[in-house]
Image (cartoon, rainbow, N blue to C red):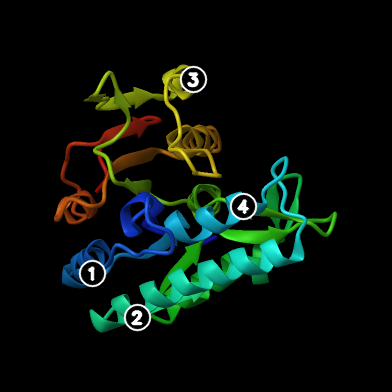
């Protein structure tokens, strides 16, 4: 399987105004697009984006025991994510980024919480990269084998892509500088410390996919499945993403399996 350079999760807390329903953070989306456009050497990257004030806002109205059974709720959640996808597409295209959005709801059935089948989806990502496109995949509402639906977290998608495509690093952009404990950024977390840290962080109110604790669970799986490095950083701060992609250290939480560095 071909290798990808980076899987970058654009957190819903960064690209939307999470306290205002169906509200994009256009300034941050534009700055992300400009940073990616300014890179002299185009990396092989895949973007994953969270639902923020779009998907989460609608899904939590209908969520019961982790499932959405209401056809109306499934359709409304899908519609909300389409609106966010259109916004991202328009902004990225305006900055010259050939973004190619792929909807998991059209590719997957959930089996035991994991999206299947993976092979075609991964091939589609690689074909998009080969065509010079920047593939982007949003967290989504996905049907399961019981003919109800569950929210497939962007964090889970990002972990899956980074693992299956052997990414150099799995990057999580949020609206904070990293994992916070006692109001301080934890600069490094070892693979061995992951389980303990998961119990010490909490999610944001209204987040139906686990918040920061959910990210740590996915990073734990990623490292256990052979991943080398994950970085949790502040995507709303101009220039931080560029520095990470250039291999420079920033204020963030670095979670390493073996060796040091992003580059």
* Direction right: furthest residue: 146
| Element on which disc 4 rests | helix
Would you name the residue on which mark 2 appears? 90
Name the residue rendered at 54%, 32% in the picture.
Answer: 224
Q: Is residue 22 left or right of residue 121?
A: left
In this picture, residue 110 sits left or right of residue 29: right
- Which mark sits nearer the N-terminus, 1 or 4? 1
Local secondary structure at mark 2: helix
Counting from the top left corner in percent of width and height, residue 22 is at 43, 64
Does residue 90 appear left or right of residue 184 in this picture? Answer: right
Residue 161 on image: x %, y %: 52, 55
Give the mark nearest the N terminus, 2 or 4.
Answer: 4
Give coordinates of residue 16: x percent, y percent: 35, 58
Residue 26 drawn above or below residue 89: above
Q: Mark 3 near mark 1, Cβ–Cβ under 8 Å?
A: no
CA neighbours of label 3 inside 10 A, class few (<14), some (14 to 19), many (20+):
few
Proximity of marks 2 and 1: CB atoms separated by less than 8 Å: no
Q: Which numbered disc flags the more N-terminal residue, 2 or 1?
A: 1
Image: 8 above or below 75: above
Q: Earlier in the sequence, mark 3 or mark 1?
A: 1
> Mark 4 sits on what residue?
61
Q: Nearer the viewer, mark 1 or mark 4?
A: 4
- The circle drawn on residue 30 is 1
Is label 1 in a helix, a strand or a loop?
A: helix
* Residue marked by disc 3: 199
Q: Are marks 2 and 4 in contact (CB under 8 Å)?
A: no
Counting other residues with Cα less than 10 Å from the Cα at mark 4, is it few (<14), some (14-19), or many (20 or more)? Answer: few
User: Which one is in front, 149 or 18?
Assistant: 18
Task: Measure the alpha-carbon separation of dots 3 and 1.
Answer: 35 Å
For the residues labelled 1 and 4, the Cα–Cα distance comes to: 30 Å
């Amino acid at each position: 399987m071909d290798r990808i350079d980076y899987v970058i999760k654009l957190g819903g807390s960064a690209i939307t105004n999470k306290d205002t329903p169906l509200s994009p953070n256009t300034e941050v989306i534009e700055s992300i697009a400009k940073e990616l456009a300014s890179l002299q050497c185009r990396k092989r990257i895949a973007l994953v984006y969270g639902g923020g004030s779009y998907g989460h806002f609608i899904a939590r109205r209908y969520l019961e025991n982790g499932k959405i059974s209401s056809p109306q709720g499934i359709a409304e959640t899908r519609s909300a994510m389409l609106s966010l996808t259109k916004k991202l597409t328009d902004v990225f295209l305006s900055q010259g980024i050939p973004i190619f959005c792929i909807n998991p709801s059209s590719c997957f059935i959930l089996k035991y919480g994991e999206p299947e089948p993976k092979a075609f989806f991964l091939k589609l990502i690689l074909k998009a990269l080969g065509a010079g496109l920047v593939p982007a995949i949003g967290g989504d509402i996905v049907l399961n084998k019981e003919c109800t639906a569950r929210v497939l977290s962007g964090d889970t998608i990002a972990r899956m892509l980074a693992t299956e495509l052997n990414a150099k690093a799995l990057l999580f952009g949020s609206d904070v500088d990293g994992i916070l404990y006692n109001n301080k950024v934890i600069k490094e977390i070892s693979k061995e410390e992951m389980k303990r840290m998961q119990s010490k962080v909490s999610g944001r109110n209204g987040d139906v996919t686990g918040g920061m604790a959910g990210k740590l669970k996915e990073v734990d799986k990623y490292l256990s499945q052979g991943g080398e490095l994950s970085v949790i950083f502040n995507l709303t701060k101009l220039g931080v993403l560029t520095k990470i992609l250039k291999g420079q250290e920033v204020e963030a939480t670095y979670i390493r399996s073996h060796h040091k560095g992003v580059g």
